Image (tube, rainbow, N blue to C red):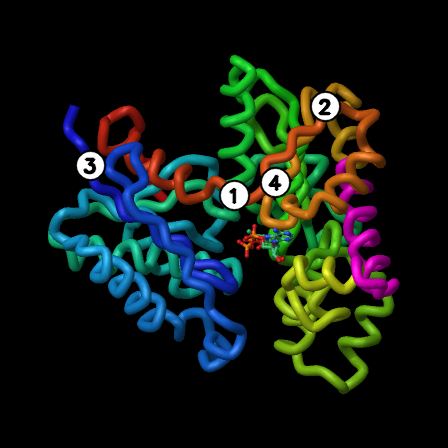
């Protein structure tokens, strides 16, 4: 079987992850952390384009990987219009929507854009994205909110949630499509997805102030008080938006998104830090409980994943709340790079036809 070289690009809010796969084998994996001040120098996510591109090309250069040897480039991205799960070829329509930020600005918007640039520079590679945050499989009742002009939208960690679910299904010899799962992705943002027979029929919109608060997301807020704050004259529209996404949550209380640092403070007797972490875990547990009712209690497993799942005390707190629901499976970190590489490989091998956006 021919081997394929696949470049994977995953721009996050605090990092750029780059990997190169030789078919299924990971040859190179780098996570370049961008300190807050480095990215603060750019007025918008789109302005970070050249900086992120240089970062990726430097990683490839140092590893001695020539662009001409790459067969496909796949990026995580982005905030497009709602679409079904799958792998998509980067087309001009898809690029236009990523540039415009049709559904908002998110670091992952650069994933498809950079994949396209680098594929072009390589001469022959194709560019793809897979399972972007806008994958939408919501059941109709989950879309309705109390205001007709503000329906619920599906914006979540689709790539990792789908990937860990498939891995779990495989590990127990079943198909993802035959299971009912609840997946709590605990990253910089937190989304809790209800997976019914391979479809995410309900999930909080991670970017819009719904769900548990997170290291850098405010989560659900008392909305009357929020309106008062918006009209207090103290904050601009952009400042209010970033209170919800980027500067809300643990970072608003503690000035850091690093849960390890907050845990150290809690372990050294800081009662407020301990209370905050418990409160975040409590809200995650409540969301998982709500998701169980969506599945009428018929839940095969609850999967806890994302970087915060490395914190054993948070996982233990949640587990005490939800152990009556179903077996709990902890998969800390994320599987996004491998999942993206596998999606591109399936296309190169002709196993999957890429979808048109
Ligand atoms: N060992 C650890 N213990 C506790 N928390 C950790 C650990 N490792 C990472 N984290 C926390 O996980 C969070 C980042 O998780 P992750 O890398 O999944 O998110 P991200 O990719 O930045 O954002 P998102 O998943 O929302 O796209 C940070 O708050 C970080 O402090
Ligand atoms: C992936 C979209 C949700 C988030 O970033 O919180």
Residue 8 at x, y percent in the picture: 33, 48
**Residue 284 lies in the magenta-colored region:** yes
Which quarter of the image is occupied by the C terminus? top left
What residue lies at 67% left-to-right and 58% top-to-bottom?
259
Residue 141 at x, y percent in the picture: 72, 35
Residue 122 at x, y percent in the picture: 15, 54
What residue lies at 46% left-to-right and 69% top-to-bottom?
34
**Residue 179 lies in the magenta-colored region:** no
Residue that label 4 marks: 305
Asked if the residue at tag 1 contacts the one at tag 4, i.e. Cβ–Cβ closer than 8 Å, the answer is yes
Q: Work out how far the residue at label 3 is from the one at label 1, CA to CA, in angstroms.
A: 23 Å
Q: Work out how far the residue at label 2 is from the one at label 1, CA to CA, in angstroms.
A: 20 Å
Q: Is residue 139 visible?
A: no
* Callout 2: SS: loop
Q: Work out how far the residue at label 3 is from the one at label 2, CA to CA, in angstroms.
A: 38 Å
Q: Work out how far the residue at label 4 is from the one at label 2, CA to CA, in angstroms.
A: 14 Å
Residue that label 1 marks: 334
Residue that label 2 marks: 327
In this rendering, is residue 322 above or below 83? above
């Amino acid at each position: 079987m021919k081997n394929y070289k696949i470049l994977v690009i995953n721009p996050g809010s605090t990092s750029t992850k780059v990997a190169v796969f030789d078919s299924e084998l990971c040859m190179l994996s780098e996570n370049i952390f961008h300190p807050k001040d480095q990215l603060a120098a750019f007025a918008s996510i789109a302005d970070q384009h050249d900086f992120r591109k240089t970062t990726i090309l430097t990683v490839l250069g140092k590893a001695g990987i020539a662009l001409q040897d790459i067969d496909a480039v796949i990026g995580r991205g982005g905030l497009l219009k709602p679409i079904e799960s799958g792998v998509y070829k980067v087309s001009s329509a898809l690029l236009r929507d990523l540039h415009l930020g049709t559904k908002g600005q998110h670091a992952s918007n650069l994933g498809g854009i950079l994949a396209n640039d680098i594929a072009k520079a390589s001469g022959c590679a194709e560019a793809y994205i897979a399972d972007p945050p806008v994958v939408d499989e919501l059941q109709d009742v989950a879309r309705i909110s109390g205001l007709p002009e503000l329906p619920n939208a599906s914006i979540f960690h689709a790539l990792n949630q789908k990937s860990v679910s498939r891995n779990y299904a495989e590990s127990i010899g079943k198909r993802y499509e035959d299971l009912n799962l609840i997946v709590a992705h605990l990253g910089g943002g937190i989304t809790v997805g209800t997976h019914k027979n391979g479809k995410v029929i309900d999930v909080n919109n991670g970017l819009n102030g719904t769900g548990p608060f997170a290291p850098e997301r405010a989560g659900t807020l008392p909305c009357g008080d929020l309106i008062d704050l918006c009209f207090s004259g103290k904050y601009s529209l952009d400042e209010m938006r970033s209170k919800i996404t980027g500067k809300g949550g643990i970072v608003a209380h503690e000035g850091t998104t690093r849960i390890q640092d907050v845990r150290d403070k809690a372990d050294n007797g800081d009662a407020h830090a301990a209370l905050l972490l418990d409160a975040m875990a409590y809200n995650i547990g409540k969301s998982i409980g709500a998701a169980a009712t969506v599945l009428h209690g018929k839940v095969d497993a609850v999967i806890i994943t994302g970087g915060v799942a490395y914190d054993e005390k948070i996982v233990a707190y949640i587990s005490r709340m939800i152990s009556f629901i179903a077996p709990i499976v902890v998969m800390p970190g994320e599987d996004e790079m491998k999942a993206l590489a596998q999606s591109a490989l399936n296309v190169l091998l002709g196993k999957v036809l890429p979808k048109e956006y």
